[in-house]
Image (cartoon, rainbow, N blue to C red):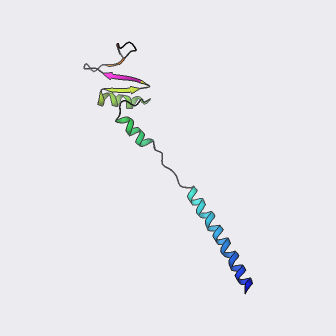
Amino acid sequence: MTNILLILFFVLILLFLFYSKRNRGLAQKTTITPTYVPFLKEQEFNPDISTDNWDLHKLRLGIFKRSQYKGLTFFVSSENKIYYLSEEGDKVYC
């Protein structure tokens, strides 16, 4: 009788270990989606965030009439000319 209980006990332990390893492997295979999409949307609707994306910069100039590109803020004048302000405060047209 004790032999049967011992065998049953070991079989249950082996089954438990087998299924716990299998479930752990499934948990490791989950993928995390990247979070860059909301960040791009935030940049699209805020012209004060600096960007390196030229297309996004041109889009923001069209919408907001100003955009920060590579740390420098560009503006669109009433004549639709693009300019930025120099350190002295002078308008430098592009």
Query: Where in the figure is residue 69, as x and y percent of width and height?
Result: 41, 26
The quadrant of the rendering that contains the C terminus is: top left
Residue drawn where x is 68% and y is 75% of the image: 11
Based on the displayed image, in which of its 4 quarters is residue 83 positioned? top left
Query: Where in the figure is residue 92, as x and y percent of width and height?
Result: 36, 14
Residue 8 is inside the magenta segment: no
Residue drawn where x is 42% and y is 39% of the image: 39
Query: Where in the figure is residue 49, as x and y percent of width and height?
Result: 40, 31
For the image, the number of numbered tags is 0
**Farthest residue toward the left?**
78
Residue 76 is inside the magenta segment: yes
Could you tell whether 15 is left or right of 74 in the image?
right
**Farthest residue toward the bottom?**
1
Residue 87 to residue 19: above or below: above
Based on the displayed image, in which of its 4 quarters is residue 40 positioned? top left
Residue drawn where x is 32% and y is 27% of the image: 61
Region of the chain picked out in magenta, as a range: 72-78
Query: Where in the figure is residue 41, as x and y percent of width and height?
Result: 38, 39
Closer to us: 30 or 73: 73
Based on the displayed image, in which of its 4 quarters is residue 7 positioned? bottom right
Could you tell whether 11 is left or right of 77 in the image?
right
The quadrant of the rendering that contains the N terminus is: bottom right
Residue 66 to residue 93: above or below: below
Magenta stretch: helix, strand or loop mostly:
strand
Could you tell whether 63 is left or right of 24 in the image?
left
